Image (cartoon, rainbow, N blue to C red):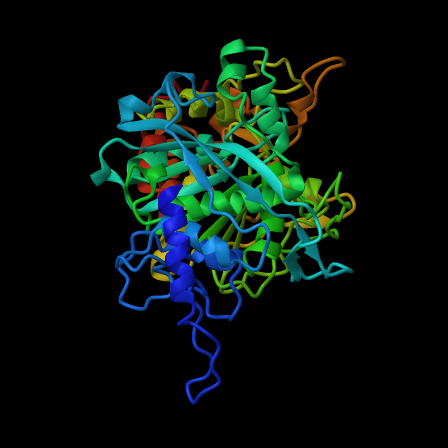
Amino acid sequence: MRYLQTLITLAMITMSHYTYSQGCGGPTPLLCDANSDQVIDQSDIDEIVLAKGTPADPGDIRDLDGDGLVSTLDARGCIAYCTETTCAVPTLLGPVLPDSQISLGASYLAEVGYEKKEFFLADIARSYTAVQPLPSDGKLVVTADAEVVAGDYNTRLVVFRPINGADFNGTVVLEWLNVSAGSESNPDWLMAHNEFIRSGFAWIGVSAQSVGVNALKNSTNSVVAARYSQLLHPGDSYSYDIFKHAGLAASEVGSVLLGGLTADVVLADGESQSAGRMVTYIDAIQPIEPVYDGFFVHSRFGRGASISQAPLPSVQFPSPSPIRDDLSVPVMILQAEGDVIGSNLESRQPADTSMIREWEMAGTSHVDSYTLLGINDPGDGSSANTMFGYLRAPNNPFGCTNGFNAGPQTYIVQAAYRALDTWVRTGVAPPTPPRLTDISSSPVVLARDENGNALGGVRSAQVDVPLATLDSVNSAPPGGFGFCRLFGRTVPFSSARVMELYPTKFDFTEMWSNSIDTSVTNGFLLEADGDALKAAASGWQYPD
């Protein structure tokens, strides 16, 4: 504290030399005015935090203490000159020990060279006010709400990162944890973690919403409740600023979250309910506070999430809510069959652009067999064998009307993540596949082939060399598992139908392999996953 007081005194002395001047050079930059807009506000504090560890030349307006290095202490000192009452620097506490008590799965990390760490992130979050009426093209105009009391928060960040820093590929993914079930889950880590691990991504799960934070605090498990008792969430109107702060912490030079490593690329991710939040973040927050280098939007609905909600005024997005087409960073959108049908086509972008790609995946459902299998999949190839087996004998652990969808979603998600990372780094955009072929809307009906599989969209061996009908239809018996409707279904062909399509096993494996090679060539399947799927087919007991 004494050091900080000295820092502020130094700033006051130095500040007298940084006054407005209308001489031939125009206004003289103000100390701490990192974006040179002649106003010192939260955006300047954020920029200084982002530049932590950067060498500073003499006179650098970000280097408050003049020690030649931009630091968090400089950012904290600049708060004294902020024109906003809510200026703050996020505070990280951790890693919180013991690691064994972290509430978020992935028990296999150590055996694949990864570690799990948890941090608490505390700050003051802002809500946002949008100019109304909200536009139908996603181009929101929002400002941080100066008339609403800012919300103190203390939330958690769960980090999965390579143990050996040399294995880090420089990309960190921040996933907005999903709270649809009343507690937190990490569906895109589950779907994409094999690619993350083999390529060296770091991943951070962000507890951005009040439901997730309160579920931890109020857990019936006394150990969990004690660990997270100090967490605090002011409400979901503040969730967007909390997610932005998490991105800032991950973007720092020598980030504490990354064990002192520095990320080259910082990506934001949201799936299902969290995808709705991601749409709103992209349309409203990213244009005015550009923290993230790219976005992954998976299984979104037709409408973005509310920019503000109770106890603040509720401001809902229009439906449909497209992602704005004037972005400066890439956005990858993935939609399952059920997402396209369930949104009544309102989740569809009008068209791909230079910064937007949308992949609609044939033969997929909102969640599927891999959603459960991925929880404990160490990436040793065994999951490909299991998923192939589900095409002939679907799993149905919750007693749904049909066995779960065993489609290609996890493999397409992993290819999409590789493509997004490449896009951000090189500017080379992913391919633009056709959309799923629809023959009517309200209700949406997809065109299907003679085997009942959807036409159009991202293709795969599972639908082009089929052993089953794969779609998004399922239900629960009376009093059954409510989420059955999201898991889709697999309807295996009879052995007679299999022999009709593929007279010998060789006929099948040749067609299967050729289809896989086409998917790899087209960029919709990674070679490692293709090899695993080929190996799985070779072990099949044809035609059962």
Q: Quadrant of residue 63?
A: bottom left
Place of residue 28 in the rendered image (x, y in percent of width and height, measured from the top left): 43, 77
Does residue 211 sit above or below 344 in this rendering? above
Q: Quadrant of residue 17?
A: bottom left
Does residue 186 sit above or below 16 in this rendering? above
Q: How many marks?
A: 0
Look at the image and tell me whether residue 423 can be seen: no
With 338 as the anchor, is 222 left or right in this view?
Answer: left
Seen from the viewer's position, the closer of residues 499 and 372 is 372
Extreme-bottom residue of the structure:
24
Residue at x 63%, y 13% (from the top left corner): 399
Residue at x 56%, y 13% (from the top left corner): 397
With 94 as the anchor, is 183 left or right in this view?
Answer: right
With 461 as the anchor, is 486 left or right in this view?
Answer: right
With 128 as the anchor, is 264 left or right in this view?
Answer: left
Place of residue 421 in the rendered image (x, y in percent of width and height, measured from the top left): 38, 50
Q: Quadrant of residue 64?
A: bottom left
Look at the image and tell me whether residue 308 can be seen: yes
Quarter occupied by the N terminus = top left
Place of residue 473 in the rendered image (x, y in percent of width and height, measured from the top left): 66, 30
Residue at x 32%, y 49% (from the top left corner): 253
Seen from the viewer's position, the closer of residues 36 and 249 is 36
Place of residue 369 in the rendered image (x, y in percent of width and height, measured from the top left): 52, 24
